[in-house]
Amino acid sequence: MVKFGIEFVPKDPYWKITYFAVQAERGGFHNLWITDHFNNRNVYVALTAAAIYTDRIALGPGVTNPYMVNPVFTAQAVATLDELAPKRVVLGIGAGDKTTLASVGVEMRKPLTAVKEAVSIIRSMANGEKVVFEGQVFQIAGASFLFKPRSRIPIYIGAQGPKMLALAGKIGDGVLINACHPKDVEYAVRCVKEGVREGGRQFNDLDVAAYTSFSVHEDLKKAAKAAVPVVAFIVAGSPGQVLGRHDINLEKAEEIREALKVNDWGRAFGAVSEEMIQAFSVCGTPDMCIERIDQLLKSGISQFVVGSPIGPKVKVAIDLISERIIPRVITEPA
Amino acid sequence: MEYLKLVELIPVEKREITADKLVDVILSSKHSDKMPSGLAIAFLQQWRQNLLSSKLGLSALLEGAILLEQEKTLVALRELRLDELVDRIKGAV
């Protein structure tokens, strides 16, 4: 059965996110993902609040990274959160964002190796084992918790590039694919399947999520307007190969990049085209979004995550998704 | 202001729509940093129990909405034709 996830950014205070988390749980969402960036509020505090006020929704960081947060600490955090929300905790981990890491003087060294090693360390620690680890990125002389972790925490790997996607297929319990367009998701799923084969696993054992930039409203123009800022940042951060796959004008993309660098929002957002919105978001009326979700499901995903901006008004958008989209995509109850 | 007394001015049939409008005012506010921590907890407790349109829920919502967006709150209440409530709030602030 396909699952619906929802992403929140703790730029908003914990109580707003918790309000929306409760609303999403009631509306039939299965997963709550909260982003982890040092310049926002702390992800685990936001998750703790959401865990207290909800009962069923699975929740976790979406995604943390092993550079800013040592894997031992991540294991400690999710194991503790699991005591509050037993068997509901999931962990999303990726390599992080190079620019953000650089802004605090952290080098993104060997991202594939770092994520692979971090997953191994977190699994062992969260399994209550004493960890001695001699890796290329992490060295742990002997670490264990003075408490007994309760549940096995499913680990999802946040991935976009082919190698990270394959790694997710090889070692992850799930994968969070940063993509919105069927072309990108189909490509990503192929990469994940390569990793699955390499690891001697079954594709169906993985929860494969499309982690999308999403915007829904009854009025298409309003939905698109809300998506524009997020799409501008995605275009600016996308390599030429990805832009080329969608026939995006590279000069326009460069113009957006330059404008964002100098905080010229008007120029950056003004340069976002209809094609860019189509390529890098799931955006439109509920019926239009259902059509796109159905296309993505055919690619083999098992979870659809609605990410920022969700809609021009988040509360209205969650109701629209709960009442008009989820029941038409899912036939079995949450 | 005694919010629990003020919300008694909201007719029972308008409680739900009032709660909904006040939630909108609070969630769309750009002054969320003004929300006191105790009030945020009260708001979430009522929401979790689906009791935002109860007297306690409305009281938390009204207090929060006025703290965050006084003018927008009064406009929303006026649109709901809760004139006596608007007058009492204006008289108290």
Image (tube, rainbow, N blue to C red):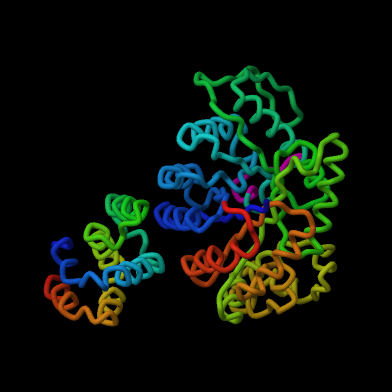
The location of residue A100, given as percent across then percent down, is 62, 52
Which residue occupies the extreme front position in the image?
A332
A312 or A263: nearer the eye?
A312
Q: Position of residue B8 (x, y in %)?
A: 16, 67
User: Is A102 part of what is drawn in magenta?
Assistant: yes
Q: Is residue A305 visible?
A: yes
Work out whether A54 lies above or below A121.
below
Q: Which stretch appears magenta?
A: A101-110
Residue at the image point whose x is 69% and y is 25% from the top: A139
Using residue A45 as the reference point, say whether residue B53 is left or right of it: left
From the viewer's perspective, tell me whether residue B49 is left or right of residue A59: left
Q: Is residue A254 magenta?
A: no
Say if A208 sits above or below A212 in the image: above
Instruction: Name the main secondary structure of what is drawn in magenta.
Output: loop
Which one is in front, A203 or A234? A203
Residue A123 locus on image (x, y percent):
66, 29
Total marks shown come to: 0
Q: Quadrant of the N terminus of chain B?
A: bottom left
- Give left or right: position of A76 versus B89: right
Q: Nearer the viewer, residue A206 or A92?
A: A206
Q: Residue at x 60, y 60 (%)?
A: A307
Residue B9 x/y as whole percent: 16, 71
From the viewer's perspective, is B5 left or right of A11?
left
**The quadrant where residue B65 appears:** bottom left
